[in-house]
Image: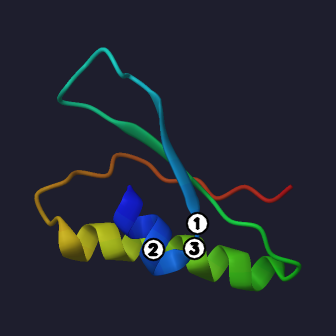
Amino acid sequence: LGRSRNNFNVACAEVDRQDNAGVAVLSFVTVSPDKVLARKILERVEDWIYERWPDVEIIGADISEI
């Protein structure tokens, strides 16, 4: 999680399933006045995870704008 903070300037946390060591539900957040830029940053985080840890299975991803 720290690497994602350093590489992409995002906040991140494990938000669910802490009782199961084989599963992690992670949340990544960024703040920007430009919603297109914010979306691109979060998409890059997802791509980075796929590239850096190819054995990790991402079951779902959702980007929400507030």
Q: Nearer the viewer, residue 36 or 30?
A: 30
3 and 1 marks in contact (CB < 8 Å): yes
Q: Is residue 55 left or right of residue 33?
A: left
**Label 3's element?**
loop
- Check disc 1 and report the residue beneath it: 10
Instruction: Report the residue at 32% width, 52% height from top.
Output: 58
Q: Across the whole image, how many numbered discs are drawn on residues?
A: 3
Instruction: Report the residue at 58% width, 53% height from top.
Output: 62
Residue type indicated by callout 3: Asn
Determine the CA span between mark 2 and mark 3: 6 Å
Q: Nearer the viewer, residue 11 or 27?
A: 11
Residue type indicated by callout 2: Asn
Q: Is residue 13 left or right of residue 19?
A: right
- Check disc 3 and report the residue beneath it: 9
- Check disc 2 and report the residue beneath it: 6
Q: Which mark is residue 27?
A: none
**Label 1's element?**
loop
Image coords of residue 13 (percent x, y): 50, 43
Of all residues, the one furthest to the top in this rendering is 19
Mark 1 residue crowding within 10 angstroms, few (<14) / some (14–19) / many (20+):
many
Mark 2 residue crowding within 10 angstroms, few (<14) / some (14–19) / many (20+):
few
Residue type indicated by callout 1: Val
